[in-house]
Image: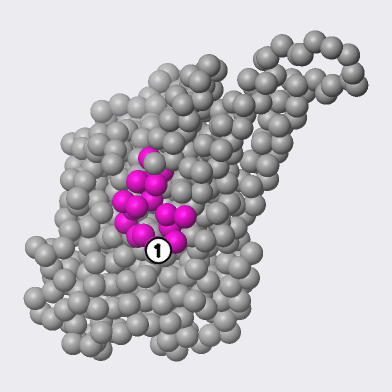
Amino acid sequence: MLAIVSAVAFGHLVAGILSPASSPFVAVGDAAVRLSPQPVVEFAKSAFGTADKPVLLAGIAVVLLVAGAAAGLTARRRPAPGTAVVAALGLLALAAVLTGPVVQPVDPVAPLASLVVGVLVQRLLHRLARRAAAPAPAGHGAPRVERRTVLAGASAAVVAGSLAAGGVGAALASGAGAVTASRDALTRRLAAAPLVERAPAVPASAGFPELGTVPFVTPNADFYRIDVALQLPTVRAEDWSLRIHGRVGREVTLTMDDLLARPLVERLITMTCVSNTVGGNLVSTARFVGVELAPLLSELGVDPGADQIVSTSRDGWTAGTPTATVLEPGRGALLAIGMNGEALPAEHGFPVRMVVPGLYGFVSATKWLSEIELTTFADRSVYWRDRGWAERAPIKTQCRIDAPAGFAQMPSGRVQVAGVAWAQPVGVTGVEVRADDGPWVRAELATEVNANTWRMWRAELDLGPGNHMVVARATDRRGLTQTDVRVEPIPDGATGWPSVLFTVA
């Protein structure tokens, strides 16, 4: 077990120095995400939500500890079986690194170092264990150091060294210091940069916080995070670049200075994850500052036949966005740099991400953006489409009940029901609620900020004592009312009416 712990820790240290994505531990986790059958992926997202990554890494750690224990047991008499287990795990990590979406020339170094250290520690501890178990030689002489004490000391040294190496490796891999300094500097640059368009202030009439609705603008710390990155990609804004190529008249590579030299706009936009279940919380709103993508692409000359924009993350993840949607007048697709008054947080795509109002994130919202290719849907597939998700995924008209909470005990009298609805990019024009299969009651809508943001609502119901089930439905500006037919989120978004059960005293 100690051999595997030391191997993982040393591999993480080397990866932190050379290439964070090549960490054996992270690479195996990434491979598990890439290769898992679609039902497993869907179960993980529905069961664990935003905690899916810690759960996966914890599961891998448990498997490694079990494998380490097995290696120790098999090596009690002969070292070869235990060494074989450790070596096999090292080769597995090497394969995971070499088959990743982005492989750098230095990437094999960390798993190979992990393999070598694991085998050496396994052999060393086996030798010490054999000596400790052997009978002491007869005779008189100077007192000998107890050999079991030597083994215990060596084991403790391995543990301490592994913890130190793993900790240093984690710190190096996170790139926290360099990224934090770069992000702070970019925040200052954004604060000083002129905006050609500023989002209006959110009026007090845009929400009903006294009834339990969420803040209209979601704090960065509360903004939902869904991605497949086990190790956050780290790149300083000063080192960042974006290559735009493919079916364009002129290819270009942009730096952060190039981006900041273009007109900057601020937009209030509600983003929605396709994994959001009916009544779920994978929807958030922020003030994004960035550069409009449509004018930039038009300057480069988009081939009329290029119906897909493939955006690539620094970690190799890809999304396919309909070109026509991005170029649609008034759509407002952004290369976002700022979020709620500061540079993008690392977990939300620093330095640059894409934001396309009205599309689910898996077809548009690439974080840690590094490349844009103009191509076609026929010529190029992308990450989630390879796994059976939809090619095109406009956001569906939905609503959510935020108050009362499920199974709440409400005082007698009229009950206030409140929530939020969204229908980007057309906007919400109505919400209705119904209690216990009774008549629909039209809810009061809060002030609309813009069609690309959610809209708060409330309704007052006269309910007698007992248990009550309330459902809600929204209608958008096209006159489309959300259906009651329950459909799971995958492949292109959930449908159905949200409901809440509570008791009136």
Query: Which residue shows up at 84% across the image and 21% down it?
Result: 144
Q: Is residue 462 visible?
A: no
Rendered-image quadrant of the N terminus = top right
Residue 264 placement: quadrant: bottom left
Read off the residue under disc 1.
Answer: 105
Residue furthest front as drawn: 139
Query: Which residue shows up at 27% across the image and 76% down it?
Result: 330
Residue 25 vs 303, above or below: the answer is above
Residue 53 placement: quadrant: top left
Of the pair 183 and 66, the residue shown nearer to us: 66
Residue 352 vs 347, above or below: the answer is below
Residue 82 vs 106, above or below: the answer is above
Left or right, residue 8 beside residue 153 = left
Magenta span:
92-109
- Which of the colour schemes (rainbow, by chain, secondary structure, one colour) is used? one colour
Q: Position of residue 431 (x, y in %)?
A: 30, 48
Q: Position of residue 158 (x, y in %)?
A: 66, 36
Query: Which residue shows up at 22% across the image and 57% down it?
Result: 382
